[in-house]
Image (cartoon, rainbow, N blue to C red):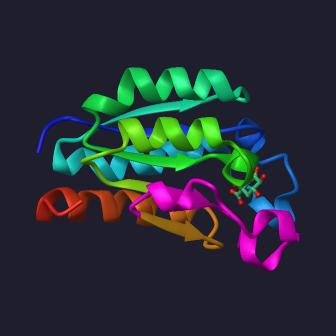
Amino acid sequence: MPGYVLLLNGPSLNRLGERDPAVYGTETLAEIVERVRRLLAPHDIDLVDKQSNHEGVLMDILQQYGPTARGIIINPGAFAHYSYALRDCLEDVGARRPVIEVHLSNVYRREPFRHHSVLAPVVTGQITGLGSRGYELAAQAVISLIQEGTA
Ligand code: DQA
């Protein structure tokens, strides 16, 4: 099952470990990325991991790596709630491959503006509120969806 999964993190996720640990946990993004990488390795899948605070840069990365990725795991941060540009980009490059939207916190238990994701209609599935293990669950989901060939 060679190839790679794209793991994309949006604004302020580079601050994990420091940023509001009560909500986002104490692990750093580098630690989370390493765990995801180790999960994919036995399946012969590489990880391309990127983070940006900028909407256009996230789109550039999606356009560069998305079309040839086996799957995409994305935590869009606050862009989930209002970025139609990112939504359209994901709809384009995410077609025909599993795309999992991850949120560390349970966005439905927080402020009302977080209750809606404009990306949700163009992703395969969403994992929210399970902390950093959400990324691992997303990787497992991508692996099994690739194996099934159903995504
Ligand atoms: C987040 C939830 C978003 O509402 C917030 O803007 C983030 C992080 C999460 O992982 O829980 O930056 O995506």
Q: Nearer the viewer, residue 59 or 141?
A: 59
Which of the pair 143/57 is nearer the observer? 57
| Point 23% across, 62% down: residue | 145
Residue 76 seen by the camera = yes
Q: Position of residue 135 (x, y in %)?
A: 50, 58
Residue furthest to the bottom = 109
Q: Quadrant of ligand 1?
A: bottom right
Residue 16 sits above or below residue 120 on the image: above
Q: Residue at x 71, y 36 (%)?
A: 14
Q: Which residues are magenta?
A: 101-124
Name the image quarter holding residue 20.
bottom right
Q: Is residue 9 visible?
A: no
For residue 113, above or below residue 13: below
Above or below for 145 versus 84: below
- Horizontally, residue 27 falls left or right of residue 59, namely right
Judged left or right of residue 45, residue 116 is right
Q: Residue at x 37, y 26 (%)?
A: 65
Which quarter of the rendered picture does the N terminus lie within? Answer: top left
Which residue corresponds to the image point at 65% horizontal and 73% vertical from the top-left?
129
Looking at the picture, how far across and down is residue 6, in whole percent?
40, 37
As for residue 100 lying within the magenta part, the answer is no
Picture quarter with the C terminus: bottom left
Figure label count:
0
Residue 102 lies in the magenta-colored region: yes
Question: Where is residue 49 drawn, in percent x and y?
Answer: 47, 33
Give x and y (percent) for residue 44.
17, 42
Q: Quadrant of residue 95?
A: top left
Relative placement, left or right, of 38 versus 121 is left
**Image quadrant assignment for residue 150:** bottom left
Q: Is residue 39 above or below residue 104?
A: above
